[in-house]
Image: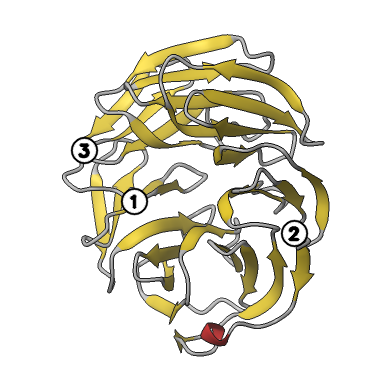
Amino acid sequence: MLATMSMSEPLWLRDGQGNPPTLRWAYALEAPLVAMDMGRESGEILAADDCGGLYRINRRGELLKSSKGLRGARAVAWSDTNAAGAVIIGDQKVLRLNGKLEADWSVGLPEPALGVAVAPFGRQTAISLANGGNLVLGEQSEQLSIFETARPLKWIQFLTNKPVLIGAAEYGQVCAHHINGERLWSEKCFASLGEMSAAANGELILVAGFNQGIQSFDGDDGSTRDSYLTEGTVSRVACSYDAERIAAATLEHHLLWLNFSGRLLWSTEVDEEIVRVICDPLGDWLLVGLRSGQILRLEWEGKSS
């Protein structure tokens, strides 16, 4: 089976509540989806399947580049400018990629890697480890900083407008560090977390709180802000650049589209596991990655408040 672009509209797209989106395109990988990320500036996607396939797809759903043989990929990160990417391979290896999906370098790690992030211009790569250690590496794999957190960070993300790394543990901590390792703030979080997404301007941090819905934190000091209560067990979350639009997915396969205040704009029940949701910077469209290997771009023509 070859990876293909398809316009077959799934039934669940029209069976939901609220203002439904239009299916702009759907792309089928050769095997089930493991992980994906998007460059916010270009809308390009980096995706990995569970048979070793790696795909670079443009914002129109067209395949730009693919490679095979990268078995064991668990997480991917892609820079906003498409300059570089990174992949966690197996437990203790991270591979740095260039725009042609070629390996620039790889690094072996003393502990299992949990999360990986690439800075907006691709100049730094951050890796979080299972022992609570965190590394920030330069373009040639040189160590720029190393720091520890109270709990191992499962999710990490560089901000766009400042040299800051935001992180969240699966339980008990949301934090911010300068890329030199300096801790800016750390906030306890008394809930298990499914995923984290920070507004690119750094003003708001969202975490999927399972039965507690979506929780939010102030990006300046980590203080607790609003909670968005939703039906289901929220495990995935994403937001636009300024968090004017929020997407979420639940363990029960519900897909949710909300505004900044948490008002539900659209929801539906998908017929399979949702691996990842990603908002575009302006909040006009949404990428949905499904376990089967389908990646869909859903688009709203006009914003409703």
Task: Kindly identify which residue carries mark 2.
Answer: 59
Tell me residue 104's x, y (percent): 74, 22
Q: On the rendered structure, is 294 left or right of 104?
A: left
Q: Residues within 10 Å of mark 1 (few under 14, many from 20)?
A: many
Type of amino acid under label 3: Gly
Task: Kindly identify which residue carries mark 3.
Answer: 172
Residue in the image at 55% along x and 59% along y: 279
Q: Is residue 235 above or below residue 107?
A: below
User: Residue lying farthest left?
Assistant: 190
Q: On the rendered structure, is 295 left or right of 266?
A: right
Question: Would you identify the image quadrant in which residue 133 lies?
Answer: top left
Label located before the other in sequence (3 or 2):
2
Element at badge 1? loop
| Residue in front for this viewpoint, 135 or 166 | 135
- State yes or no: discs 1 and 2 in contact (Cβ < 8 Å): no
Element at badge 3? loop
- State yes or no: discs 3 and 2 in contact (Cβ < 8 Å): no
